[in-house]
Amino acid sequence: GGLTSELVYPYQASDETCDKNKENAPVVSIDGHEDVPANSEDGLMKAVAHQPVSVAIDAGGSDFQFYSEGVFTGQCGTELNH
């Protein structure tokens, strides 16, 4: 698997299906992973300086469900489901 670029497949906020041609045209391959220590802003900053980063979140709380923009400042849950 891999990741495509923003140039090849720009983000568009809409509820539609993915363009399979663009989705399957990776410009970089993923060949491993590393864990970033929990609650380590410094660790996260170092990681994003070197490679793409994926995250998991608890999307079940009402703070997150009603979140609409900007930096999320609500309560963070621990049941990772997204």
Image (tube, rainbow, N blue to C red):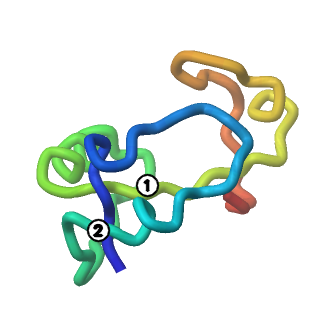
The vertical placement of 28 against 46, above or below, is below
Which image quarter is the N terminus in? Answer: bottom left
The residue located at (60%, 32%) in the rendering is 13
- Residue at point 74% right, 60% down? 79
Q: Within 10 angstroms of label 1, few (less than 14), some, or many (20 or more) residues?
A: few
Q: Could you say whether the residue bearing mark 1 is in a helix, strand or loop? A: loop
Left or right of 4 on screen, residue 69: right
**Disc 1 residue type (three-letter):** Ala
On the picture, is 35 further left or further right than 70?
A: left
**Which type of secondary structure does the marked residue at label 2 adopt?**
loop
Q: Amino acid at mark 2?
A: Pro
Label 1 vs 2, first from the N-terminus: 2
> Which residue is located at x 26 percent, y 76 percent?
30
Q: Position of residue 75 (x, y in %)?
A: 71, 32
Frontmost residue, 68 versus 8: 8
> Which residue is labeled 2 in the image?
26
Image height of 49 relative to 21, above or below: above
Number of residues whose C-alpha sits closer than 10 Å to that of mark 2, classed few (under 14), some (14–19) or many (20 or more): some
Q: Residue furthest top?
A: 70
Q: Nearer the viewer, mark 1 or mark 2?
A: 2
Q: Which residue is mark 1?
A: 38
Q: Which mark is residue 58?
A: none
Q: Position of residue 2 (x, y in %)?
A: 32, 72
Q: Label 1 to label 2, Cα distance in Å?
A: 29 Å
Looking at the picture, how far across and down is residue 41, in whole percent? Answer: 32, 39
Q: Residue at x 14, y 45 (%)?
A: 49
